[in-house]
Image (cartoon, grey):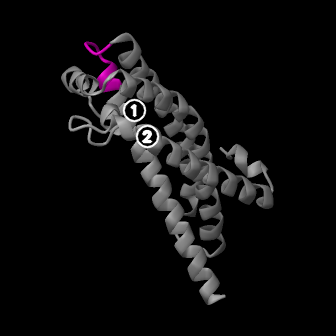
């Protein structure tokens, strides 16, 4: 199934890639500042430790390590992350599509993976939504004694896995494109 972003001409695809890439970097920088109060011995990775906690006991340890101010930062971070989802899924998805075009033009292997991986970035963002909803329920409603921590964990692992695959594929396409320019 063709990806909707393929309906854009190449110039617009490139522009949207760079805009979404720049937005992703800017949002990551803001989230880094927002996340500083969330780094504790129980949450050494801040909000990511919360995402990967997986058990009610680990969630409780993390939440107990955050004072009220830090929990407000966590809530803001979870909300702000929705903007990040849009930016990173679009940037990496377009990166996969652009990589596939470079790979296909030089007849290197794996060109066919570009479109499925681009769809995978939007799927990863969907898992990120479910993860954030789970974490929000935990944070705001104290829903730690049920399945929410494990749902957040599995959604985070799937999201991170898809992002990793998309980034690796994008870098592969970049290398292929650079090799093509050096030979051409």
Residue 174 vs 52, above or below: the answer is below
Q: Circles 1 and 2: CB distance less than 8 Å?
A: yes
Tell me the residue that label 1 is attached to: 155
Q: Which mark is residue 159?
A: 2
Q: Which mark is residue 116?
A: none
Residue 20: x and y, percent?
Answer: 65, 50
Residue 161 vs 58, above or below: the answer is below
**In the structure shown, which secondary structural element does the residue marked by tag 1 occupy?**
helix
Please state the extent of the stretch shown in magenta in the rendering: 143-151
Residue 111: x and y, percent?
Answer: 57, 63
On whether residue 147 falls in the magenta region, the answer is: yes
Q: Residue 9 occupies which quadrant of the picture?
A: bottom right
**In the structure shown, which secondary structural element does the residue marked by tag 2 occupy?**
helix
C-alpha distance separating marks 1 and 2? 6 Å
Residue 151 vs 36, above or below: the answer is above
Q: Residues within 10 Å of mark 2 (few under 14, many from 20)?
A: many
Q: Residue at x 50, y 53 (%)?
A: 166
Q: Nearer the viewer, residue 27 or 161?
A: 27
User: Would you say residue 131 is visible in this rendering?
Assistant: no
Horizontal relation, residue 84 to residue 145: left or right:
right
Q: Residue at x 55, y 38 (%)?
A: 85
Residue 171 vs 181, above or below: the answer is above
């Amino acid at each position: 199934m063709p990806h909707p972003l393929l309906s854009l001409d190449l110039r617009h695809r490139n522009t949207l890639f760079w805009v979404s890439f720049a937005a992703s970097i800017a949002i990551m920088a803001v989230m880094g500042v927002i996340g500083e109060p969330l780094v504790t011995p129980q949450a050494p990775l801040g909000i990511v430790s919360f995402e990967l906690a997986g058990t009610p006991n680990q969630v409780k340890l993390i939440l107990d390590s955050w004072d009220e101010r830090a929990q407000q930062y966590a809530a803001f971070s979870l909300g702000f992350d929705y903007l990040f989802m849009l930016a990173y899924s679009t940037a990496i998805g377009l990166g996969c599509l652009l990589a596939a075009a470079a790979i296909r033009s030089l007849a290197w292997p794996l060109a066919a993976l570009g479109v499925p991986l681009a769809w995978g970035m939007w799927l990863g963002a969907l898992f990120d939504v479910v993860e954030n909803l789970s974490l929000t329920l935990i944070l705001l409603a104290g829903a730690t004694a049920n399945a929410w921590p494990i749902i957040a964990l599995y959604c985070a692992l799937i999201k991170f896995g898809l992002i990793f695959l998309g980034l690796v594929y994008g870098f592969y396409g970049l290398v292929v494109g650079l090799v093509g320019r050096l030979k051409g």
